[in-house]
Structure formats: structure tokens, C-alpha cells
């Protein structure tokens, strides 16, 4: 196995959607804590749910299609700064959010907008066509909290297991034992929305420090471990 262990988080939100910190503040926070690679994954929302929220006079906390390229340009700019200042990789991503059908999909290292109204199979195919990684986030949370929301991917996991590159075995403070029992490819992420979420489950990957090596390790589930990141304590 070649490379060093990299501290990573591939599920992070900013004020581009429903996070509490700006992109710049998020990058500074993770960079100052010594992270090696992160992915910013702000929400894009299916058109049906977007229209429903606007009809109810709600202000959706998502990136709308016409602003998506501006979002990516901001991520690319911050990626350059993050590397120069912290030697930290910032990988562009998004959380493709279909609340109408009950599934979210993380697209890591994507280059173009993907319609959240598409089928799971088509969304994953488009992520892969762009050279990205498809992750099934918080697949079993609805069962743990009793809401049964966003359970579509898990309820159909036998159908989708080979579509996804990885499944979140841990999300923030939740561990999804069922993902481990199925021996699916796994990652652990914070689902970061505010500073306290930094101290949560993370992924450690043993590989070279570049996005292609990280993506290969995730696809192969080789040299991947989970780590419970905690606030520094004074000794």
C-alpha cells in the first residue's frame, strides 16, 4: 500500500445551501485542523420539491441550476487557496437531493449540474461519466430516528449495491451497522452544517495525496478506515 493516511470528510455544507458557515470559513476550519482532503457537497433539489417550496413562500436553501456553474467556480478558486495555504485538497461535489422520491446522492468530483429528478441509476451513471464518485449518504438514518424518511436507497439496497462506489457507514454521530454487516464499500462523513459537526465520524484513506488516488481507494475500498474525530483537549 503506497501513501500516507489522509484525514478526509466528503460530506460538507456551506451557506451555498443550508450550512451556517461560508465556503471560505469552512475551508479555513478544516485546513487549520489538519485535514488532508474534503469535499464540499451543497444541495441541489429536484424541480418538483423546489416548486412546492416556492409555492409555500419558502426560501429553499439550495443551489438552483442557473447558479451551479458559479458554485463550481467558487469551489475551484477555494481549492487553489486551500492547497497553497494548507496543502489540503478541496474536491468539488454536491448532494443531489430528491425529496419527492426520498433519496439523496453525493456526487464527488463532479464538473456539471445533474438533474435530481432523474432516476437513481441515471444520476449515478452521470456522476461516473464525469469521472466522479457516487456515495449513498445516511442510508439508514430514517430507521434510527423512527421517521422512515430518505430510506429509498436502503429499502432497495440489493438493487443499488453495485451502482454506488461507497455507502456511509457513519454519518456525524450515527453508525449504520447494517452497512458493515452487508460488507458494502464504506466511508464515514460529518454531514457538516455547523462548527460542532466537525467533531464526528470521518474517513481515513491510505493513498497518495491527490484526487485520483483518493477516488481509486474509495472505489476499491482499499486502505479505507473510519475515525472518530474529537476536539483537542489540553493536557
Image (cartoon, helix red, strand yellow):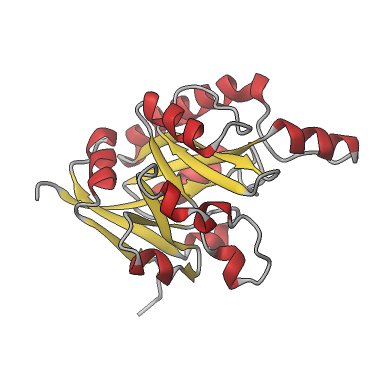
Q: Quadrant of residue 129?
A: top left
**Is residue 31 positioned above or below 138 on the image?**
above
Give the quadrant of the C terminus.
bottom left
- Residue 18 visible somewhere in the drawing: yes
Tell me: residue 46, above or below residue 21: above
Give the side of residue 218 with respect to residue 56, left or right.
Answer: left
Tell me: 119 left or right of 2.
Answer: right
Image location of residue 165, percent across then percent down: 35, 44
Q: Relative to residue 175, is residue 219 depicted above or below?
A: above
Residue 230 in sight from this viewpoint: no
Q: Position of residue 226 (x, y in %)?
A: 32, 63
Q: Please name whichever residue, 159 or 89, is drawn nearer the observer in this view of the structure.
A: 159
| In the foreground, 184 or 112 | 184
Say whether residue 36 is left or right of residue 169.
Answer: left
Using the rendered view, name the quadrant where residue 142 is placed.
bottom right
> Quadrant of the rendered structure where residue 178 is?
bottom left
Which residue is located at x 49 percent, y 59 percent? Answer: 198
Position of residue 26 measured from the top left corner of the image (x, y, whole percent): 52, 45
Q: Residue furthest bottom?
A: 235
- Number of marks present in the image shown: 0
69 shown above or below 38:
above
In the foreground, 23 or 213: 213
What residue do we see at 54% from left, 61% from top?
A: 197
- Residue beneath the point at 20% across and 52% down: 222
Q: Residue furthest left?
A: 1
User: Residue 132: x percent and y percent?
Assistant: 37, 32
Amino acid at each position: 500500500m503506497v501513501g500516507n493516511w489522509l484525514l478526509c470528510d466528503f460530506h460538507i455544507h456551506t451557506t451555498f445551501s443550508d450550512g451556517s458557515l461560508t465556503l471560505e470559513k469552512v475551508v479555513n476550519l478544516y485546513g487549520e485542523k489538519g485535514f488532508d482532503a474534503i469535499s464540499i457537497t451543497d444541495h441541489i433539489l429536484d424541480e418538483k420539491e423546489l416548486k412546492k417550496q416556492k409555492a409555500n413562500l419558502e426560501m429553499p436553501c439550495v443551489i438552483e441550476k442557473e447558479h451551479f456553474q458559479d458554485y463550481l467556480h467558487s469551489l475551484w478558486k477555494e481549492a487553489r487557496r486551500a492547497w497553497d495555504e494548507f496543502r489540503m485538497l478541496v474536491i468539488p461535489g454536491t448532494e443531489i437531493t430528491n425529496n419527492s422520491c426520498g433519496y439523496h446522492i453525493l456526487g464527488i468530483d463532479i464538473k456539471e449540474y445533474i438533474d435530481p429528478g432523474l432516476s437513481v441509476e441515471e444520476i449515478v451513471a452521470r456522476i461516473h461519466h464525469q469521472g466522479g464518485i457516487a456515495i449513498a449518504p445516511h442510508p439508514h438514518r430514517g430507521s434510527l430516528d423512527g421517521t422512515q424518511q430518505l430510506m429509498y436507497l436502503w429499502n432497495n439496497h440489493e438493487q443499488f449495491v453495485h451502482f454506488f462506489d461507497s455507502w456511509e457507514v457513519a454519518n456525524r454521530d450515527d453508525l449504520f451497522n447494517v452497512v458493515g454487516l452487508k460488507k458494502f464499500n464504506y466511508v464515514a462523513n460529518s454531514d457538516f452544517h455547523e462548527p460542532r459537526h466537525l467533531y464526528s465520524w470521518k474517513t481515513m484513506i491510505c493513498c497518495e495525496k491527490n484526487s485520483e488516488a483518493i477516488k481509486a481507494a474509495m472505489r476499491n475500498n482499499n486502505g479505507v478506515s473510519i475515525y472518530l474525530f474529537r476536539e483537542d483537549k489540553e493536557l
